[in-house]
Image: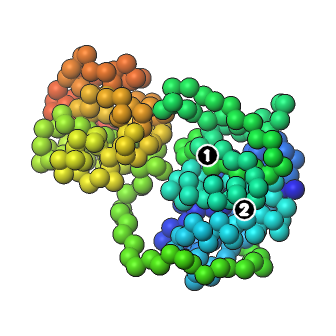
Amino acid sequence: MAILVYASSAEGKLKKSAFEVVTYGKKAAAILGCEVHALVLGAAEDAGKLGEYGAAKVFHLSDAGLENFDSQTHANVTAQVADKIGATLVLCAHDSFGKSLVGRLAVRLNAGAVSGANSLPSMDGGFAVNKNVFSGKAIATYTISSDKRVISVMGNTFPPEVVGNAVQPESIDVTIPANRVRVKEVKTVKGTVPLPEAELVVSAGRGVKASENWGIIEELANTISATTACSRPVADMGWRPHHEHVGQTGVAIRPNLYIAIGISGAIQHLAGVNQSKTIVVINKDPEAPFFKAADYGVVGDLFDVVPKLTAAIKKHQSS
């Protein structure tokens, strides 16, 4: 009996989510009374580092056929490894990779599955985990009755915790099928923390009035080392790229801090950000719906408030 973690990597390094899921796996292993093992597919120079976060073993397969993510191939190989080590629980991050793996793994392993879990397993009356439903307005408990289970873990739910030492990655004998998807080109955004992994996010809406005014938003974000985001209208008007659009129809995020500037707080936007741990709203309209969801609110003109906030933070940082 063991827990297997599929650890996501990109551009030769593990993603932050890999350490989060191994941390989750270590805590789950303590509940289930077993070890957690990690699987890394493709290049990852820091694969052994997963041992620091609780992985007793790290299996690393860097075959050329695994370099570009193909959900069919990665699910096939992960299922083989799970069978070989006798894993009764397979974990992955609830990111673009994990979302496409959960269903395939469940079918291959004849396992029950829950996507987007945000709690550790409870064994009181059976194996059960919680997840948010109805755009975060409620919490549902899912009980899995099958012998094997597959779970994707929501990002920024379980902070990575160092509990041990790095381990030497090892290989494992599996059959790697030929990819059915041919990747011609990969375009990625570099130099910033991806929104699903960001712990600090500064977001703005139509209240900035024009794309040329975005500088004050970026200055605040750079001051606190945050990732920038925007509302859908801002992306649709071409003021910001679409990969920064957060909300129900964009990227769903759950950072530790979400600063919403000049965003009214339409229900579609709130659905994608309301799981943020702390929400700060800056808006000149005291009746803006976003204030109802905010932990802290500032009623004022963003062109007056934001520069002063940035200046105050810089003064504090230099003191």
How many circles with numbers are drawn on the protein? 2
Image quadrant where one finds the N terminus:
bottom right
Type of amino acid under label 2 = Arg
User: Mark 2 or mark 1, which has the lower sequence index?
Assistant: 2
Which amino acid, mark 1? Ser
205 with respect to 139 (left or right): left
Q: Position of residue 100 (x, y in %)?
A: 56, 58
Q: From the viewer's side, name the closer residue of 133 and 274.
A: 133
**In what quadrant of the picture does the C terminus appear?**
top left
Task: Say which of 248 and 231 sits in front.
Answer: 248
Label 2, residues with CA under 10 Å away: few <14, some 14-19, many ≥20: few
SS at mark 1 in the image: strand
Residue 27 percent location from the top left of the image? 75, 45
Tell me the distance, in whole angstroms, between the alpha carbons under discs 2 and 1.
Answer: 16 Å
Give the quadrant of residue 157: top right
Residue drawn where x is 37% and y is 43% of the image: 249
Which residue occupies 21% across, 20% down? 285
Q: Is residue 163 visible?
A: no
Residue identified by numbered label 2: 108
Q: Which residue is under mark 1?
A: 115
Please say if the residues under marks 2 and 1 sit with CB atoms less than 8 Å apart: no
